[in-house]
Amino acid sequence: MPAITTCPTAPLPPREQLENLVASILAEARAQGATATEAAVSFGSALSVTVRLGEVETLEHHRQRGLGVTVYIGQSRGSASTADWRLEAIRDTVQSACAIARHTAKDSCAGLADPDRLAKDIPDLDLYHPWPLAAEDAIALARACEAAALALDPRIRNSEGGSIATHTGLVLYGNSQGFCGGYPATHHSLSCSVIAGDEAGMQRNHWYTMARDRNDLETPVAVGQKAGQRALRRLGSRRLTTRQVPVLFAPELARGLIGHFVGAIRGGALYRKSSFLLDRLGTLVFPDVVTIRERPHWPKALGSAPFDNEGVATADRDLVAGGVLQGYVLDSYSARRLGMETTGNAGGTHNLIVEPGPLGHEALLRQLDRGLWVTELMGHGVNLVTGDYSRGASGFWVENGQIQYPVHEITIAGNLNTMFKGIVAVGSDVDVRGGIRCGSLLLERMTVAGE
């Protein structure tokens, strides 16, 4: 194998450089006739490695930079972007945005965020933990992760690889109302996927860890062993006959259910009247055991942000309290369309926390009693207009609160409206690997389609 040149991720450019670029964009837009402008400049550097069966399969260095500008001429809007930071490119990009705005219909809801909602004091959320990881060291970590999985049991016969990735980035946002803010952030991850086999067939599974700080990652050996254990427990999978039973969603899948809920209360879905949760503010959408909080300022958390993509200050709030919908997920535009105010969610939510209940995994299985524990989902059969839900699944059949055998090649189906109201317990086994933190969710009943 040829020698690998050490090349850790590139250092971030000086913040002042990005501030000057934003100032140049705003000045150019003003000179070209824009009545209001917002701009973002970004820089990112990443290293990713995948090792399969001990050999390097991919090794990639990424360096990305770009800038984007949105101009308003009266109530008409135009946007353009480029990866070129030269002043000539800025001039051309702004010119393109202005040309689009001059040919765009007026929209009374278009415009910058209200000035009084912009962030004034920007807290340090401890999101920047660079990892000067050399390629050789990344390869060694990925190999150790995969090797731990392969060494676990002779029935682990193949691998889809061990992977490691580290990313460092800085985005600076500014607008013509005088706001200019940005912060550096890092994101690191380690994963492994392996295939176990016996006389009955083969099964794959995986595990991963991610964090802002590399010191908060699980060890390569732990990740590899969990991936191997998860593949082994899938051996001997069976199909089920069609039935209606209680269903327990593992934490990493329960997070997806909450993601569907968020999608249904986004401003865009609401003002287009394309959500099954239309006009449900202040009503019961979950049972009273469910409370969902947004906590944007948690230090080092993956979903933390001091302000949103429009510069609006983020703040703690409850989306759901005791099952009752307290608020939507709005940016400035969708808020104006709905006759409301922005919730500081341009670009998405920031650390949603589903308040955990008292029961751990084993206790939830006992409460499930007889039903399906779902550990993997496939496909995208979710309709947020109607709430209809149908996805391929695999997991484990449970009797008398005890796991009996793994199951596969089944479909679980229901309607999100009914599914949300049918949540009977939220687990204490919270998965923190993402912007939504949720424990297992036990649903009263779903249709399981099989043989």
Image: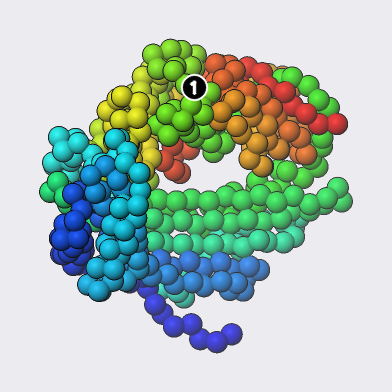
Q: Which quarter of the figure is the C terminus placed in?
A: top right
> Is 114 or 153 nearer to us in this picture?
114
Side (left or right) of 292 relative to 208: left
Q: Residue 45 at x, y = what percent?
A: 36, 67
- Residue located at (19% from left, 60% from top): 32
Q: Is residue 94 above or below residue 3?
A: above
- Viewer-side residue, 82 vs 46: 82
Residue at the spot of label 1: 277
Q: Position of residue 282 (x, y in %)?
A: 39, 13
Can the viewer see residue 102 in this picture?
yes
Locate the N terminus by quadrant.
bottom right
| Residue 359 appears in the picture as rendered | no
Residue 93: horizontal and vertical position, in percent?
30, 65
- Residue drawn at 70 percent across, 30 percent down: 412
The kind of residue tagged 1 is Leu
Q: Is residue 138 above or below residue 424?
A: below
Q: Position of residue 288 (x, y in %)?
A: 45, 13
Residue in view at x 30 percent, y 53 percent: 102
**Direction from residue 222 to residue 99 in the image, left or right:** left
Which is nearer the eye, 282 or 152? 282
